[in-house]
Amino acid sequence: MKTVLVVDDEPRIVELARDYLEHAGFGVITPPTGVGTRRRRIRKPDVLVLDLGLPGMDGLDVARAIRRDSTLPIIMLTARDDELDRVLGLEIGADDYVTKPFSPRELVARIRAILRRVDRQEEPGDRLEVAGVSIDVAECASRLPVGPSS
C-alpha cells in the first residue's frame, strides 16, 4: 500500500484529503503541523502533500530542504494561486501544484499519476513497447547528436 503524508494547518483540509485518500486505498499520515517533515524519514511516505502556508515555517523552505536530499514526490496544496508562486513552487522541486479550493478526487488522480511515473522510473529495462512497436531507448539515445546543432 502506498502512503501519503499530508501536511496542512487546516484540520478540515487534512480530514478531507485523508478521507478521500483512504477511500482510494492509500495509507495516510497526518501529523501535527510541522512535525511531518521530520517524521518522513521514519515512516517513509511515497508522496508528500504540502501546504505552503504553515504557521512558523514556509512550505517552500520545507520543500527546498526535502529536495536537497530526497526525490520524494511533492504536491503543493495551497491557497497561493498567483502564477509566480506556482512557478516558484515547481522550480524548487514540487512535482505538482494544486490550489485551494481543490477537488479531492483530482488530488487523488494527481497522486496516482505521480506514482505511475515514479513506479515506471524504477522498472528495469531500456525497451519500450507500444501497440506492437518496440523501441530500444538506449540505442535511440546513443544516436542523438552531441554538441550544438547547426
Image: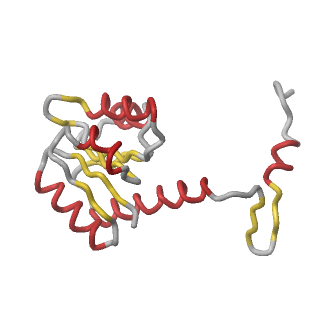
Residue at x-position 84% and y-position 30%: 146
> Count the marks: how many?
0
Quadrant position of residue 14 = bottom left
Of 104 and 73, nearer the camera is 73
Looking at the image, is 107 positioned above or below residue 72?
below
Q: Position of residue 86 (x, y in %)?
A: 36, 37
Quadrant position of residue 29 = bottom left
Residue at x-position 28% and y-position 73%: 23
Horizontal placement of 101 versus 137: left or right? left
Colour mode of the rendering: secondary structure
Horizontal placement of 76 versus 123: left or right? left
Q: Position of residue 131 (x, y in %)?
A: 75, 74
Q: Position of residue 40 (x, y in %)?
A: 32, 44
Of 44 and 91, nearer the camera is 44
Horizontal placement of 100 versus 85: left or right? left
Of 79 and 8, nearer the camera is 8
Residue at the front extreme, as displayed? 42
Quadrant position of residue 16 = bottom left
Which part of the image, by quadrant, shows the C terminus? top right
Which part of the image, by quadrant, shows the N terminus? bottom left
Residue at x-position 35% and y-position 63%: 108
Residue at x-position 41% and y-position 40%: 94
